[in-house]
Image: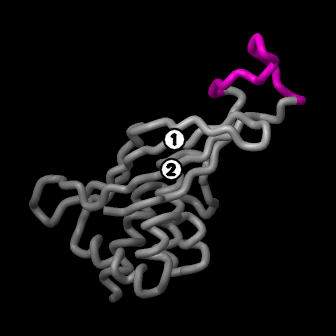
Amino acid sequence: MKKTLGVVALLALSLGLAGCDNYVTPKGALETVAINLSKGDVKEFSKGLVGNAATQYASKAGMVTLKAKLTGMKGLRIEDAALVSVTPVRNNGFQTAVKTYTVNVLGHATGAKDIRVIEAVVTCDIFEMDSAMCPTRNSSGRCTFNEQDQFSECKVADLK
């Protein structure tokens, strides 16, 4: 058990992670989940999970299972996120979208090449800033959908 905790703590430390949550980017959401996994805090760990990831891992037993996947791995690192899809959504007057990303955790056994240890699916709810504060509008008077006018909340939806 100590070895498993050490591996998870090494993952968090090797990523240069501080103690604050970051659910703004897909990689940040996965890093936050890794930190909370290393702390063994089920409540905080669970905040970063939705969908299948929450169903499988948002418990003490689930955390033990996830830690077991990392046991024996060295040089753990999180790759940059890759966008898989964008699904536009209209919700209460805000133009929103759900962006889905994959984020890989790589590592290796002693003396071996890097392999993908975990593939995370991260979903980000994208919200447009309040229309009263909207700096640009299209011909129908709605806020335009661009990166500068958005904020996001990302959660880990699956861990394979």
Which residue: 38% across, 49% down? 103
Work out which quarter of the rendered image holds the C terminus and state it.
Answer: bottom left
Q: Quadrant of residue 2?
A: bottom left
Residue 52 placed where, x, y %? 43, 67
Look at the image and tell me in which quarter the N terminus lies.
bottom left
Under mark 1, the amino acid is: Lys
Q: Residues within 10 Å of mark 1 (few under 14, many from 20)?
A: some
Q: Is residue 77 above or below residue 34?
A: above
Image check: 142 left or right of 76? right
Secondary structure at badge 1 equals strand
Residue 28 at x, y = what percent? Answer: 53, 51
* Mark 1 → mark 2, Cα distance in angstroms: 6 Å
Q: Is residue 85 above or below residue 52?
A: above
Dot placed on the residue nearer the N-terminal end, 1 or 2: 1
> Counting other residues with Cα less than 10 Å from the Cα at mark 2, is it few (<14), some (14-19), or many (20 or more)?
many
Amino acid type, callout 2: Thr
Q: Which is the main secondary structure of the residues drawn in magenta?
A: loop
Q: Residue at x 89, y 29 (%)?
A: 132
CB atoms at circles 1 and 2 under 8 Å apart? yes
Judging by the rendered image, the residue that carries numbered circle 1 is 99
Segment colored magenta: 132-147
- The residue shown at (62%, 39%) is 89
Q: Which residue is mark 2?
A: 123
